[in-house]
Amino acid sequence: MKTILAAALFAGFVQGAQHSQTPSSIRVPDAATAVAIAEPALVKVYGKRQIDYEKPLIAALENGIWNIHGSLCCPGNKGERTCDERCAGGVAELKLPERDGKVLSISHSK
């Protein structure tokens, strides 16, 4: 009888552990969520001023990994910012899995 009770308790524990790990409860469902997770991590590494300068942050999902990167912008002749491929420099980059949102890597391109 004790063995049956222990087996039932263990089965309930395993089932509960599996239930708490359901993909829908820990998933990064969209680009806005990916950016919301990435921005504080990037600010911590590169500073608020740098990340604010690289906004908007852009997120793209590829093979279950969110790739979030800043926008490459450079100052124009009249103090405005232009964001295009002609600017020199790099941007902050962060990768996180869609399934759990844990940061895989942070880097800055040149």
Image (cartoon, grey):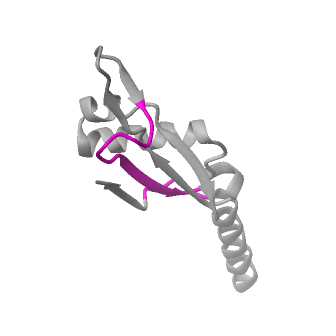
Q: Is residue 7 above or below residue 26?
A: below
Please provide percent x and percent y for residue 11: 72, 74
Q: Is residue 41 above or below residue 50?
A: below
Image check: 52 left or right of 12? left
Residue 4 located within the stretch drawn in magenta:
no
Q: Quadrant of the N terminus?
A: bottom right
Please provide percent x and percent y for residue 32: 58, 36
Residue 93 located within the stretch drawn in magenta:
yes
Nearer to us in this view, 49 or 85 = 85
Q: Quadrant of the C terminus?
A: bottom left
- Choose top left, top right, bottom left or bottom right for residue 13: bottom right
Nearer to us in this view, 75 or 37 = 75
Q: Main secondary structure of the magenta part?
A: loop
* Image: magenta residue range: 83-103
- Choose top left, top right, bottom left or bottom right for residue 109: bottom left
Residue at screen point 66% across, 49% down: 25
Outermost residue toward the top? 78
Residue at screen point 46% across, 57% down: 95
Please provide percent x and percent y for residue 69: 44, 46
Residue at screen point 30% across, 14% down: 78
Please provide percent x and percent y for residue 87: 35, 40
Nearer to us in this view, 59 or 37 = 59
Q: Is residue 86 above or below residue 74?
A: below
Nearer to us in this view, 10 or 96 = 96
